[in-house]
């Protein structure tokens, strides 16, 4: 089995996902958004993008690597 992709050149390739923002986000649009693709080659991964560039790239994380990241920044 090949490794999951780490990035997408455009987050618009993730069709049918619901992008979420933190409730701590302000209206200044300067935060990140996350989505969990339910199907396709990205199913099971967490996608992260810049809210200022919604058509821009998305980073893809496994659930385990995202938990490790959150633990480290806390």
Image (tube, rainbow, N blue to C red):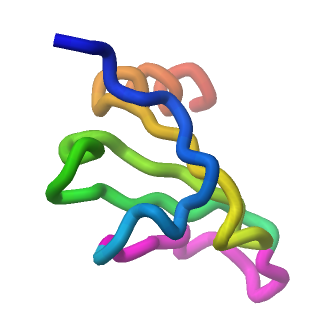
Image quarter where the C terminus lies is top right
Give the vertical position of 8 relative to 2 (above or below).
below
User: Quick check: 28 left or right of 67?
Assistant: right
- Nearest the camera: 37 or 13? 13
User: Quick check: 47 left or right of 10?
Assistant: left
Image quarter where the N terminus lies is top left
At horizontal 53% and vertical 71% (from top left) the residue drawn is 21
At horizontal 47% and vertical 59% (from top left) the residue drawn is 34
Residue 18 percent location from the top left of the image: 35, 76
Residue 39 percent location from the top left of the image: 15, 56
Residue 5 figure quarter: top left
Residue 68 figure quarter: top left
Does the magenta run of residues contain 27?
yes
At horizontal 45% and vertical 63% (from top left) the residue drawn is 13
Q: Main secondary structure of the magenta part?
A: loop
User: Quick check: 33 left or right of 64?
Assistant: right
Does the magenta run of residues contain 24?
yes
- Nearest the camera: 60 or 8? 8
The stretch in magenta equals: 17-29
């Amino acid at each position: 089995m090949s490794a999951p992709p780490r990035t997408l050149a455009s987050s618009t390739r993730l069709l049918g996902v619901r992008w979420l923002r933190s409730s701590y986000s302000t209206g200044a649009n300067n935060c990140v958004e996350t989505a969990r693709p339910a199907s396709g080659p990205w199913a099971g991964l967490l996608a992260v993008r810049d809210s200022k560039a919604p058509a821009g790239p998305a980073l893809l994380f496994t659930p385990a690597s995202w938990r490790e990241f959150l633990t480290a920044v806390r």
